[in-house]
Image (tube, grey):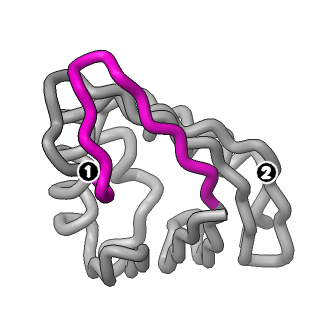
Amino acid sequence: MSSLSTDFFVRYYQAYNSEDPAALTLFYSPDVIFTTAQGEQRGVEAILDTYGYLIGQFEDRMTPDSILVDGNRAAVEITDVFTARQDVADFMGVSLKKGESLTLKLCALYTVSNNKITHATIYTR
């Protein structure tokens, strides 16, 4: 069993920022559970649907500010910058014109098994 490292999450966020769903898929367990303020998503397909929407509307760039690994779990503080690719009437209660950005400070708690994310909970910090 390989141990979880900060490098896993550096590579994960690189894949996220690449806008390549196939690269991102490699990091998820098939039955992954993602929990955010918008609710719970189960399975890779649901997560990729949301990802497709986000990268269609925004240039979405996540930067891990700090990564703390404890066994098979990790806490990651993230700066997430959404830059609108077109006018967006309502995104998390904010209206953005093309080219405008919204920056969120997030904290993500992950559980990883066999080098795949099995559960993630994302909080606004």
Q: Residue at x 44, y 40 (%)?
A: 16
- Is the residue 79 above or below the residue 30 in the image? above
Magenta part, dominant SS = strand
24 relative position to 119: left or right: left
Q: Residue at x 64, y 73 (%)?
A: 109
99 in magenta = yes
Q: Position of residue 124 (x, y in %)?
A: 58, 65
10 in magenta = no
Q: Nearer the viewer, residue 34 or 97?
A: 97
SS class of the residue under badge 2? helix
79 relative position to 24: left or right: right
The residue that mark 2 highlights is 6
Q: Position of residue 69 (x, y in %)?
A: 83, 66
Q: Position of residue 68 (x, y in %)?
A: 84, 62
| Residues shaded magenta | 91-106
The residue that mark 1 highlights is 91
The disc labelled 1 sits on which kind of residue?
Answer: Phe
Q: Residues within 10 Å of mark 1 (few under 14, many from 20)?
A: few
Q: Residues within 10 Å of mark 2 (few under 14, many from 20)?
A: some
Q: Nearer the viewer, residue 124 or 66?
A: 124
- Is the residue 36 above or below the residue 69 in the image? below
| Distance CA(mark 1)–CA(mark 2) | 30 Å
Q: Position of residue 86 (x, y in %)?
A: 15, 23
Q: Is residue 35 visible?
A: yes
Q: Quadrant of the N terminus?
A: bottom right
The disc labelled 2 sits on which kind of residue?
Answer: Thr
SS class of the residue under badge 1? strand
